[in-house]
């Protein structure tokens, strides 16, 4: 399967794995199909903690997001000669080796200073029903949550002003959908580092992913324009994109917080409205 990785401007990160294990939109010559008896790389680690078995439809971006890591780190940890070619059933290390455990990610520093990162992973964004009840309230964008030392204490802010149009639902919507106008500023919700900026993950349109520390990352989807690049350090409140409707049925921001790769309800972390 071909795994798409990197910024849209630099690499094709939007090619999902097909049934033989290539992430290209077409099959590569000589590709194995899932019925072949060949033992794939890493087979001896299948099922072990810290390892991931490649599934149909995976991309390197998705694998990184689902495991809370930078796809580039996963490529390095597995000595992949061609990061654009992996196979269904191949087993990848998705945690840092012991030798670089202490170097994988810079720990968070004081609020206002950006932290280093790895990358993280999510499933396809799916629309969620609008929240019932009275007209949605506007969301304040700049009220930070007090932060202290430790990965769990992040000074979050809302990434945009706007009406909440869809809430978190683990089965249907992995984050919050927030309304706005095309061109509205999308801001970094906390200090971090850009681990992905591009249009390579189906269902998210123009997407930015930030890694904030060893525990948290955030995703900002459906933008019309991106203002950051991979490996760039950003600060809370910095403009990283403009709201749009890429790969969506209306102008909105789809915003996710991932804790160790698992989607969590952003409303439980963001300041009250």
Image (cartoon, grey):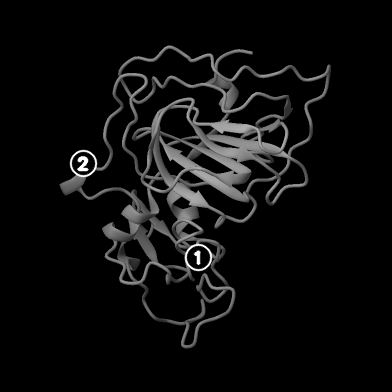
Q: Residue at x 62, y 49 (%)?
A: 204
- The C terminus lies in which quarter of the figure? top right
Image height check: is 243 above or below 132? below
Please state which of residues 208 and 152 is positioned toward the viewer in this rendering.
208
Q: Are marks 2 and 1 in contact (CB under 8 Å)?
A: no
* Residue 43 visible within the image: yes
Q: How far from the left and from the top, in percent, is residue 146?
A: 43, 11
Q: Secondary structure at mark 2?
A: loop
Q: Residue furthest bottom?
A: 30
Q: Nearer the viewer, mark 2 or mark 1?
A: 1
Check residue 12 in the rendering and tell me which mark sits there, or answer none. Answer: 1
Q: Which quadrant of the figure has residue 136?
A: top right
Q: Determine which residue is flagged by label 2.
A: 103
Q: How far from the left and from the top, in percent, is residue 6?
A: 44, 57
Q: Which quadrant of the figure has residue 211?
A: top left
Q: Secondary structure at mark 1?
A: loop
Image height check: is 58 above or below 192? below
Q: CA distance from mark 2 to mark 1?
A: 28 Å
Circle 1 packing at 10 Å, graded few (<14), some (14-19), many (20+), is many
Q: Is residue 103 left or right of residue 265?
A: left
* Residue 123 visible within the image: no
Q: Residue at x 30, y 71 (%)?
A: 81
């Amino acid at each position: 399967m071909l795994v798409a990785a990197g910024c849209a401007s630099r690499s094709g990160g939007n090619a999902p794995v097909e049934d033989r294990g290539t992430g290209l939109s077409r099959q590569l010559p000589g590709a194995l199909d899932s019925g072949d008896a060949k033992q794939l790389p890493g087979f001896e680690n299948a099922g072990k903690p810290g390892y991931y078995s490649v599934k149909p439809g995976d991309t390197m971006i998705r694998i990184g997001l689902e495991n809370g890591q930078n796809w580039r780190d996963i490529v390095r940890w597995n000595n992949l000669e061609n990061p654009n070619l992996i196979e269904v059933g191949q087993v990848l290390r998705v945690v840092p080796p012991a030798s670089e455990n202490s170097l994988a990610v810079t720990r968070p520093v004081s609020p206002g200073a950006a932290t280093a990162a790895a990358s993280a992973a999510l499933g396809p964004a799916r629309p969620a029903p609008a929240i019932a009840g009275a007209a949605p309230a506007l969301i304040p964008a700049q009220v930070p949550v007090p932060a202290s030392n430790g990965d769990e204490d992040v000074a979050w802010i809302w990434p945009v002003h706007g009406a909440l149009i869809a809430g978190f639902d683990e089965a249907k919507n992995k984050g919050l959908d927030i309304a706005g106008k095309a061109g509205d500023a999308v801001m970094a919700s906390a200090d971090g580092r850009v681990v992905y900026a591009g249009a390579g993950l189906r269902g998210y349109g123009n997407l930015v992913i930030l890694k904030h520390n060893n525990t948290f990352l955030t995703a900002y989807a459906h933008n019309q324009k991106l203002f950051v690049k991979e490996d760039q350090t950003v600060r809370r409140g910095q403009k990283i994109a403009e709201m749009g409707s890429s790969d969506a049925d209306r102008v909105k921001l789809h915003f996710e917080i991932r804790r160790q790769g698992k989607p969590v309800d952003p409303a439980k972390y963001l300041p009250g409205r």
